[in-house]
Image: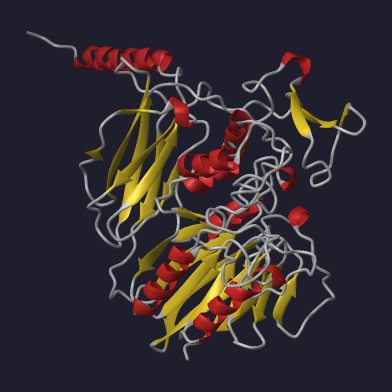
Amino acid sequence: MYINTKKLLIALMLTITLTSCEIWERSPNIFQATGIKIGEVTTSTAIIWTRLTADSIRVDNKSPMPVVEYFNHETKEWADAERGKALQWEPRVIYPNQSDIHTIEGAAPGKLGEVRVLYKPETEMEWLKTEWREVDVDKDFTRQFPLANLIADTKYLIKVESREIGTEYLGQVIDGNFTTAPDLEDQKQLLFTVTTGTAYRDLDTSAGFKMYYEMLKLNPDFFIHTGDILYYDKLAKTKELAEWHWARMYSLPSNVEFHKQVPSYFIKDDHDTWVNDCWPTRDIKYMGEFTFEQGLEIFTYEVPIPKPTYRTVRWGKDLQMWFVEGRDFRSPNNMEDGPEKTIWGKEQLEWLFSTFEESDATFRILVSPTPIVGPDRIKKNDNHANKGFRYEGNLIREFLSKQTNSFVICGDRHWQYISEDLKTKVREYSCGPASDSHSGGWNQNDVLPEHKYLNVRGGFLSVEIKRESGEPIALMKYYSPEGDLLHEDKYPTI
């Protein structure tokens, strides 16, 4: 029997094409417009964050934005209000032009469906697969997948697949990758990047933040966001509007591109918990229906993070980091200072001191959402560098002064600096905000004796842990949002 192989090949290609078209025609029903996040990577574990959306892209920037008015009890009128001037005024949210939570600028409405994660070492052929899991409609249509039994110091490829419930056809698939931490005795050279203050109002490009693209050029092993990831204060007057802040931020192309290939460790501060300088028992009406407790919960499902949120992570022989929780346990800022006043709480403070002393890592880095050393502005009273928390701050600085090869990396402040406490010699590196338009709060000419470097700029900090002539060093480099090197500092062993 004669077979025309050319016609058979054409027919086969046509069948494949038609099949592909059939899948494609049915697949654009479910998407992942807010990307993925890879978090909490260790030698053997990681957490993959996912979220399903109804559309492939965010609502465009020409769409309406909600407007908030506040009821002035003295005038009995609704009016605009600056933050802090109307803390006991009740807000109301107005959606203009018949818009709603799903159609305002930057919205990426969630959708019920299923997700799973495929993962494998880069050199392997066979994919490991999680089970299909529904996203949680009560947690902003998110789902997190803990991965275990990973191989240390290994590059993993991942695929995050989506589908509608009850169908075999795939929706959007996102490819990503990450590398696990090295074994405890491995002296591997490492590089990571750090930032704070990613305020949406201060974006420096239509795609998001320039610094994310510049960080990618350094090929970081991981990324640390020290808090103020977004700013709830002005517009998050309901739980739904708080979740919208996350969708608006993480549907930006710069965030989607960065977070699918760089693992992250997230810390929250005041603005991404609830409101400026907040604490658990603060009683204000300014935030409307949105509560402090809701802010704590939302953070745990909008980023990949374990419980408790304070934790320590080891990366090889030369690096161990401690990420502290600065909002959950704190006393009121206006409480009189003394042994009972705290930011971290007794349990966390004891955990930090004991685990820090037990560590044999070459460099031990305390990563704090707020300053430990400062100096900070006199009018502020929200961190360990301020007089309001001086008692606990002194305890922490005295403890760190007795630890070799240890220093602090902090966020919160809107300027880059390196400082050294005049009494204890504890050194602190403030990473500075993400963009130049978010920088400020300090006079560039006000250089104090504590300052080893001061620059009222945006950008990011990189930290490289390596060995020179066999001796371990930590090399800190400050960059502008455009990736220009602004300053570098070498931290030697003692």
- The answer to which of 104 and 309 lies nearer the viewer is 309
Residue 21: image location, x then y, percent? 38, 15
Q: Residue furthest left?
A: 1
How many numbered circles does the render carry? 0
- The answer to which of 134 and 336 lies nearer the viewer is 336
- The answer to which of 34 and 77 lies nearer the viewer is 77
- The answer to which of 275 and 272 lies nearer the viewer is 275
Q: Is residue 154 above or below residue 367?
A: above
Quarter of the figure that contains the N terminus: top left
Q: Is residue 364 visible?
A: yes
* Residue depicted at x 66% and y 76%: 418
Q: Is residue 190 visible?
A: no
The image quarter containing residue 184 is: bottom left
Q: Residue furthest right?
A: 75
* Residue 81 horizontal side relative to residue 368, left or right: right
Residue 74: image location, x then y, percent? 90, 34
Residue 61: image location, x then y, percent? 71, 30
* Residue depicted at x 45% and y 54%: 309
* Residue 176 horizontal side relative to residue 78, left or right: left
* Residue depicted at x 43% and y 21%: 112
* Residue depicted at x 71% and y 35%: 235
Residue 185: image location, x then y, percent? 28, 75
* Residue 286 horizontal side relative to residue 43, left or right: right
Q: Is residue 222 above or below residue 69?
A: below
